Amino acid sequence: MKDLLKLKTSISEEIENILNAQVKIEAHSSALYLAMSAWCDDQGLDNAADFFAKQSDEERTHMLKIFKYISDRGGRAISPEITNVPVDFESFRGVFEQTLEQEMFVTEQFNKIADKCFKAKDFVTFNFIQWFLEEQVEEEYVARRILELFDVIGEEGTGRWEIDRHLVKVTFDGE
């Protein structure tokens, strides 16, 4: 019976655990971006609200991709519990600073996963993670470009709405 159980999974417990931890991080990112979308909408920043709603969907898609991968490899994917999601933010610039911080944190976590996979000689999962690492380059780039708008335009007067208007160009150029 024990040998049969061993055949059911082709993923180690250590890799399964770190991937399930990443599922939770992606779910938290999704919830955070949804909260940011609601805050921006409340501030009358329609393009930013749309941007964060799309980001929320994208993070949920990432979460589900990892969740399915764990299951496909015979592991036990765990649906995450998400808590401590803020509903209010200090400033328009602050949401994008927090976005960049979140994306840099996610990149760091994927790098740790890749390192563990490499050390464990789990090259299948290592290969799977490469897509996420490439995706993170774009995520960080977009957040940095948006923050540059704050430096160039400024938030004074109609600056917030100018930045909101320019978001469409920054966020959809590469898509």
Image: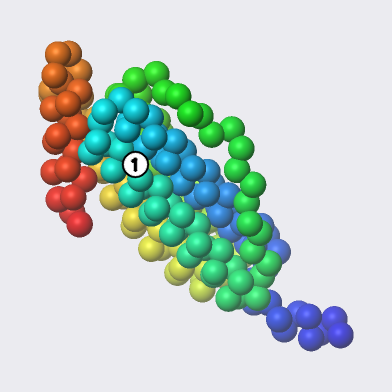
Q: Is 108 displayed left or right of 96 in the figure?
A: right
- Residue positioned most to the top: 156
Front residue (pair 144, 85):
85
Which residue is depicted at the point 46% across and 68% down?
128
Q: Position of residue 55 (x, y in %)?
A: 36, 47
Q: Where is residue 118 in the image (x, y as percent from the top left)?
A: 53, 63
- Residue tagged 1: 52
Q: Is 3 displayed left or right of 71 in the figure?
A: right
- Residue positioned most to the right: 1
Q: How crowded is mark 1: few (under 14 residues within 10 Å), some or many (20 or more)?
A: many
Which residue is depicted at the point 19% across and 38% down?
167
Q: Position of residue 164 (x, y in %)?
A: 19, 32
Residue 175 seen anywhere in this rendered image of the structure: yes
Front residue (pair 67, 164):
164
Q: Is 174 displayed left or right of 2 in the figure?
A: left
Front residue (pair 38, 112):
38
Question: Is 120 drawn above or below residue 164 in the view shown?
Answer: below
Which residue is depicted at the point 17% across and 26% down?
161
Front residue (pair 91, 19):
91
Element class at badge 1: helix
Q: In which quarter of the image is the C terminus?
A: bottom left
Q: In which quarter of the image is residue 143?
A: top left
Question: Is 6 drawn above or below residue 35 in the view shown?
Answer: below
Q: In which quarter of the image is the N terminus?
A: bottom right
Residue 18 seen anywhere in this rendered image of the structure: no
**Number of marks in picture:** 1
At label 1, the amino acid type is Phe
